[in-house]
Image (cartoon, rainbow, N blue to C red):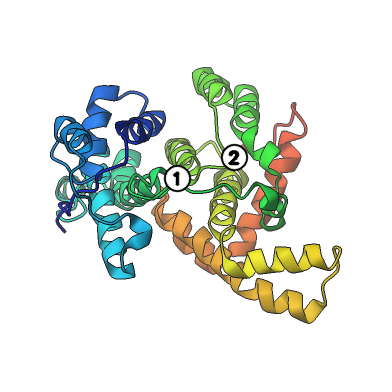
């Protein structure tokens, strides 16, 4: 898949600068100057200098996302995702990165945690790049609008509130420092981790961190601690997606108009496709999780994830809890 498309010329260079700064929030270790170059390519230009010249000269622009036919908008989104994936994630979906993994597997190291993680990295990086572009929306007319009046519905699909999820890294860090004392530095890193539960990119990134920990510490963590935090992230990831569904917005408007009451049949008609899409998005999260085994487990036993998540919340509410560790036989 090519990453070239007809260049879009923003109305001002400030719009592009804001996009580069937003990209820097996702990749803080990368120099802003480099991220400006990547941003220029997300607009379809060769580099930042070419983008600046196009803006200053008021060159003709390709249509913005909303003005493109659906198929052309999808092609542009895919092209932009490939740019992020190749230049910022170091992965090319067109060629894959499994050759080294296959070679290592032949050598008999296929059970090594590092190899297991690398085998799952492609799907994760591909999905993360897509989410980065969806949040950044450099070629949209305006950045994605926030539906603040509808935020109260977010917790309908989640066993923990937005505020609880924001505290998840700190709670995990506290629990880790008590129960995995031979690796206290991990507990400190978790405690200092800042999670934005309103961002699908942030949820994927923290999910990748916890997936790696649960892989390397598979002999230490029991199923509650492997499945529970992963599901808490997945359900919120899915809830963010369905927030913009017309059926959900229609349900909210009908609920407001009815003073908080809505006939059960009407409610079911509106919410059935929303709950179905939410389930599909949870599966998408696990399909790109850095533990491939969890996707299969979720397909067969979704209730096990929900129960583990509920147990996790109980554990976290007791700061001295020693549950969640594998018991030695």
On the rendered image, what quadrant is the N terminus found in?
bottom left
On the rendered image, what quadrant is the C terminus found in?
top right
Q: Identify which residue is drawn at 50% across, 61% down.
A: 281
Label 1: element kind: loop
Mark closer to the chain start, 1 or 2: 1
Residue 59, above or below 306: above
Tag of residue 143: 1
The residue wearing badge 2 is 326
Question: Is residue 48 or residue 237 the one in the foreground?
Answer: 48
Question: Can you give x and y, in whole percent of width and height, for residue 146 in the image?
Answer: 57, 47
Question: Count the marks: how many?
Answer: 2
Q: Identify which residue is drawn at 33% across, 30% down.
A: 17
User: Residues under labels 1 and 2: Cα distance?
Assistant: 46 Å
Label 2: element kind: loop
Q: Kindly indicate the quadrant of the structure image that contains residue 62.
A: bottom left
Question: Can you give x and y, in whole percent of width and height, for residue 265 in the image?
Answer: 77, 81
């Amino acid at each position: 898949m090519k990453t070239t498309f007809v260049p879009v010329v923003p109305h001002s260079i400030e719009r592009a600068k804001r996009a580069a700064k937003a990209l820097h929030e996702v990749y803080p270790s990368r120099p802003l100057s480099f991220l400006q170059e990547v941003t220029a390519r997300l607009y379809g230009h060769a580099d930042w200098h070419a983008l600046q010249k196009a803006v200053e000269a008021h060159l003709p622009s390709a249509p913005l996302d909303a003005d493109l036919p659906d198929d052309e908008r999808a092609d542009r989104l895919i092209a932009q995702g490939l740019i992020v994936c190749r230049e910022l994630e170091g992965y090319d979906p067109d060629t894959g990165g499994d050759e080294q993994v296959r070679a290592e597997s032949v050598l008999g190291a296929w059970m090594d945690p590092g190899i297991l993680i690398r085998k799952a990295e492609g799907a994760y990086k591909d999905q993360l790049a897509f989410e980065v572009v969806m949040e950044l929306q450099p070629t949209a007319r305006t950045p994605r609008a926030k539906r603040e009046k509808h935020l109260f519905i977010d917790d309908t699909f989640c066993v923990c509130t937005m505020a609880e999820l924001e505290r998840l890294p700190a709670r995990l860090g506290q629990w880790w420092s008590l129960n995995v004392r031979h690796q206290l530095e991990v507990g400190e890193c978790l405690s200092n981790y800042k999670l934005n539960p309103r961002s699908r990119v942030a949820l994927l990134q923290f999910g990748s961190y916890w997936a790696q920990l649960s892989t390397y510490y598979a002999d230490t963590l029991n199923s509650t601690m492997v499945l529970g935090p992963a599901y808490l992230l997945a359900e919120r990831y899915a809830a963010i997606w369905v927030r913009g569904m017309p059926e959900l917005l229609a349900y909210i408007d009908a609920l407001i108009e009815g003073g908080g009451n809505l006939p059960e049949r009407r409610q079911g008609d509106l919410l059935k496709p929303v709950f179905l899409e939410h389930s599909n998005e949870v599966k998408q999260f696990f399909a790109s999780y850095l533990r491939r085994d969890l996707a299969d487990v979720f397909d067969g036993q979704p209730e096990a994830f929900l129960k583990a998540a509920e147990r996790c919340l109980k554990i976290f509410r007791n700061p001295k809890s020693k549950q969640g560790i594998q018991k030695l036989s």
